[in-house]
Image (cartoon, helix red, strand yellow):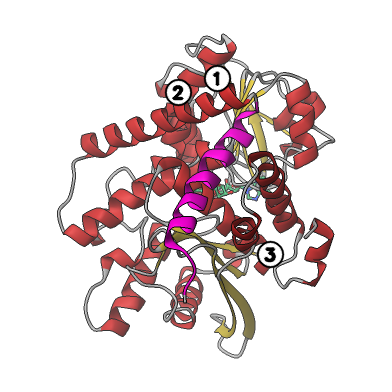
Amino acid sequence: MTVSDLDMHEWDSPMYREAIGQFDRVADLMGLDDNVADRLRFPQKATVVSFPFRHDTYENVDTLFGYRVQHLTTMGPTKGGIRFAPDVNLGEVAALAMLMTWKCAIVGVPFGGAKGGVRVDPMALSRAELQRVTRRFTMEIINVIGPDTDIPAPDMGTNEQVMAWLMDTYSQHMGHAVPAVVTGKPPALGGSVARREATGRGLMFLLPQAAHHVGLEVAGARVAIHGFGNVGRYAAVAAEEMGCRVVAVSDISGAIYDEDGIDVASAAKWVDEHRLLEGYPSAEHIDGAKLFTVPCDVLVPAALQGVITSENAGDVQAKVIIEGANNPTNIDADDTLKERGIFVVPDILANAGGVTVSYFEWVQDVQKYFWTENEIVGRLRQIMTSAFDDVLGVATTENVDMRTAALIKGIRRIADAKLVRGIFP
Ligand code: NAD
């Protein structure tokens, strides 16, 4: 089957085509069994719902669309975030679910990939509205999630509070508390300490190895970060703690730049108080799109997919890109970065810290035995850095880039498991 044959599929979208394009290229390169390859190209389950949502103004009711896609149920429960965004769609969620499958396999956590979303702008909702959307969406998908079947987590536009409402709604329905149904909850409800910081921190755990590979000094390295939400903000905090200079960060309102280094804590405080970087007084404001081309050594896309494109890839000044967001680099931009010798640590490896600590959280909830922050951060560091070494090892032996190597590692693990499980009946 070729990519053009995807036209007839329900989950067809530009992002799904990107994910399939990457998968097909690597499956070919690996000489993957065609039967296994075909099974892995499509999600195993996809749920689409529509439901009514009453605004705070009582007479105003909208119909919202929601999605939950489970790509692979071979390895254990499925796992993946729920995003609230105005343009989320089935194809986007299907692509992200597939990426989650590879990601879990790369870091060796016993989950398949899933992803979900509601097509709504969370910035336009009051707290009460956000709660109603979350609880109703949870009810709509209640039969497809569960601690042994599919475990959601936060993603773009959702956070700890949203996960708490999801856990509460599920638990009300079951008649008893079920903390393990979701990760990324507040610690008061059985959430893991250090989950909030895990993705951003995990990214930065890989910086020393990536820097070593390209001959860059970590201390004083200039870092630019696209996105200042959960991933971007804690990546910025970790970079600063490692002695880097965070020269630029951005959010939906635009970017701020300071060649001497932004005071990350002060920018974070501003965002806590004002929601956006807009108006932040202690740095120069620049156009959001310029963030990708500012003078820097390390670029961390940590907001949206498809932001490093054939248009801006030629102007990226960084030597290393560590992908915090899922799918931030288009395939054609990847080729340009490769030609220019920019070392890319791909999303499915770089941002796996989130699902790794989510796995720790689930294990703690199931066992009802909680670990210390030191244990969690130490195990996270160990898993992330050895996954990096493994992927770099594959890249070296197979003479391929890191994205291809990461996919080879992830796909190989899944394909092996599928072949030994066999086909039912
Ligand atoms: P978030 O909602 O906490 O933050 C998103 C950030 O992106 C915000 O600063 C927002 O202002 C900014 N943004 C939104 N639209 C933008 C636009 N059009 N232009 C510029 N900036 C924009 O989301 P998050 O959890 O930090 O997730 C960010 C990315 O990381 C997503 O791709 C997500 O899938 C991925 N990711 C998240 C986690 C996690 O643990 N949260 C784990 C792995 C991957």
Residue at 57% of width from left, 23% of height from top? 397
Whole-percent x, y for residue 60 in the image: 62, 86
Secondary structure beneath disc 3? helix
Residue at 55% of width from left, 15% of height from top? 213
Q: CA distance from mark 3 to mark 2?
A: 36 Å
Mark 1 vs 2: CB contact within 8 A: yes
| Dominant SS in magenta | helix
Residue 208 position (above or below residue 387): above
Tell me which amino acid carries mark 1. Gly
Corner quadrant of residue 295: top right
Q: CA distance from mark 3 to mark 1?
A: 39 Å
Q: Which residue is mark 3?
A: 91
- The circle drawn on residue 261 is 1
Corner quadrant of residue 367: bottom left
Indicate which disc, 3 or 1, sits on the residue closer to the N terminus. 3
Q: Is mark 1 within 8 Å of ligand 1?
A: no
Tell me which amino acid carries mark 3. Gly
Residue at 73% of width from left, 37% of height from top? 308
Neighbour class for label 1 at 10 Å: few (<14), some, many (≥20)?
A: some
Magenta span: 400-424
Residue at 42% of width from left, 81% of height from top? 143
Q: Is residue 362 left or right of residue 410?
A: left
Secondary structure beneath disc 1? loop
Q: Quadrant of the N terminus?
A: bottom right
Q: Is residue 423 magenta?
A: yes
